[in-house]
Image (tube, grey):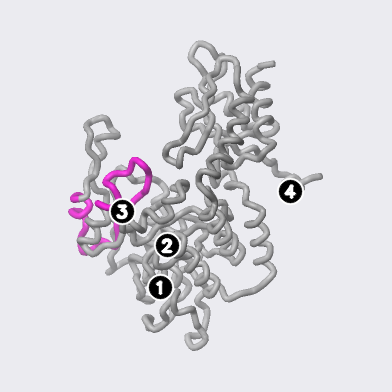
């Protein structure tokens, strides 16, 4: 029996890397897929549906409100636009022209990355603070909280914080410095799940807005994300994303989501219009979020450990390779398998092996973040029960092992 991709002439792959966007994300739970199918069979008022999503997101994150977006990058764009325009529909209409508005966002230099293009797309300029000597080998220091505060001026719309386990300064120091200057903090937490505790951590540490990916560990639709935080900023983000082709008298959003009384009128279709999420994505994301929250993290790790353990056992005695079961401490000790090509023992470079795995049948994609060290990493998040023996057989064939 063929699947939809085969009928379209597209190869299906074994995804041992993880839920990367370029690899189409992960595999949704049957409950999520079923919820999306059910959602597709009815029509609703999207503002009412987003209001329901807001309540579910608030419950899961501890934020005042939330919004389902088309991804974490969309959340960053919408969050930045909200910090620039607030609840002023005139400003919303002018974005990305930020003339006469607060149009700078402060960020630690060590946290710059190409994903912050989504922030700049709102029409702001990023102002870098600090120098990361600890990364350049010139010292031990990184940006400090006082430097964040020092970079804030009357033109500052927000502070951007990219959350990783190695981010400096610590988020509570950044939120204290920013709030001392009356400036909100946007946290990019796209890939910071698991641990599940991160759903609440950033809000608890003072963040005004937090963006999560919906299609990674949450297990939601790939084209989905969460923006959560202050109610007024979420309302601004929603106003700049939703279809606003409505008569004022007939536009009746739920008051706990968008307080109409605070607006002089409706903005036109906003800068966030390309970031919209459909009813299927909204329902799928809410369903996935609830499943993620109720699952015991220990049970989640055990499930992954069983799956990846089968792969580790199948890969023992690979010629010229060391196989080790490791734990990713940055993601709640997620178990993974490292295959290290030992210098002088393997006649195949890690890059060559990765290429052959990717171009073979079945195509197998692995984590190549440490390929310069001769390491290929295999993760469990997107594997099925049938994948470990298929990976082992293919890798042995590539290496010429019996």
Q: Position of residue 222 (x, y in %)?
A: 57, 53
Q: Position of residue 340 (x, y in %)?
A: 51, 22
Q: Secondary structure at mark 2?
A: strand
Return the residue nearer the eye: 153 or 281: 281
Disc 2 crowd rating (10 Å Cα; few below 14, some 14-19, many 20+) is many
- In this view, the mark in front (1 or 2): 2
Disc 1 crowd rating (10 Å Cα; few below 14, some 14-19, many 20+) is some
Q: Residue at x 38, y 81 (%)?
A: 263
Asked whether disc 1 touches disc 4, contact meaning CB atoms under 8 Å apart, the reply is: no
- Which quadrant of the figure has residue 240? bottom left
Q: Residue at x 44, y 76 (%)?
A: 256
Cα–Cα span, label 1 and label 4: 41 Å
Q: Residue at x 68, y 41 (%)?
A: 12
- In this view, the mark in front (4 or 2): 2
Q: Secondary structure at mark 1?
A: helix
**170 falls in the magenta region:** yes
| Residue under label 2 | 228
Asked whether disc 3 touches disc 4, contact meaning CB atoms under 8 Å apart, the reply is: no
Return the residue nearer the eye: 99 or 382: 382
| Residue under label 1 | 93
Q: Earlier in the sequence, mark 1 or mark 4?
A: 4
Part of the protein shown in magenta: 146-173
Asked whether disc 2 touches disc 3, contact meaning CB atoms under 8 Å apart, the reply is: no
Disc 3 crowd rating (10 Å Cα; few below 14, some 14-19, many 20+) is many
| Residue under label 3 | 126
Q: Is residue 140 above or below residue 275?
A: above
- Which quadrant of the figure has residue 121? bottom left
């Amino acid at each position: 029996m063929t699947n939809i991709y085969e009928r379209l002439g597209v190869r299906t792959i074994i995804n041992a890397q993880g839920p990367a966007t370029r690899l189409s994300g992960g595999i949704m739970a049957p409950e999520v897929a079923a919820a999306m199918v059910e959602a597709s069979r009815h029509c609703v008022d999207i503002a009412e549906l987003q209001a329901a999503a807001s309540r579910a997101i608030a419950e899961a994150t501890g934020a005042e409100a939330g919004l389902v977006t088309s991804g974490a990058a969309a959340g960053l764009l919408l969050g930045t636009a909200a910090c620039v325009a607030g609840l002023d529909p005139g400003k919303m209409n002018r974005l990305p022209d930020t003339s006469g508005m607060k149009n700078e966002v402060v960020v630690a230099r060590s946290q710059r990355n190409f994903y912050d293009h989504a922030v700049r797309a709102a029409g702001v300029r990023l102002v870098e603070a600090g120098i990361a000597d600890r990364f350049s080998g010139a010292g031990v220091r990184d940006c400090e909280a006082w430097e964040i505060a020092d970079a804030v001026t009357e033109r500052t719309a927000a502070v951007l914080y990219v959350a990783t386990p190695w981010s400096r300064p610590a988020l509570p120091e950044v939120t204290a410095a920013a709030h001392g200057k009356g400036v909100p903090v946007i946290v990019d937490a796209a890939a910071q799940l698991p641990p599940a505790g991160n759903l609440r951590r950033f809000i608890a540490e003072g963040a005004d807005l937090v963006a999560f990916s919906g299609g990674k560990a949450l297990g939601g639709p790939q084209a989905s994300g969460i923006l959560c935080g202050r109610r007024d900023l979420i309302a601004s983000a929603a106003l700049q994303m939703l279809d606003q082709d409505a008569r004022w008298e007939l536009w009746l959003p739920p008051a706990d989501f968008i307080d109409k009384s605070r607006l002089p009128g409706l903005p036109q279709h906003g800068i966030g219009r390309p970031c919209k999420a459909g009813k299927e994505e909204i329902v799928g994301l809410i369903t996935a979020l609830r499943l993620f929250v109720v699952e015991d993290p220990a049970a989640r790790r055990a499930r992954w450990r069983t799956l990846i353990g089968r792969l580790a056992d199948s890969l023992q005695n690979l010629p010229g390779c060391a196989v080790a079961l490791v734990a990713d401490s940055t993601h709640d000790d997620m178990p993974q398998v490292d295959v290290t090509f030992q210098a002088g023992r393997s006649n195949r470079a890690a890059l060559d092996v990765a290429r052959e795995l990717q171009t073979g049948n079945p195509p197998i994609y692995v984590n190549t973040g440490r390929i310069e060290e001769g390491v290929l990493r295999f993760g469990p998040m997107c594997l099925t029960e049938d994948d470990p023996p298929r990976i082992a057989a293919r890798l042995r064939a590539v290496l010429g092992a019996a």
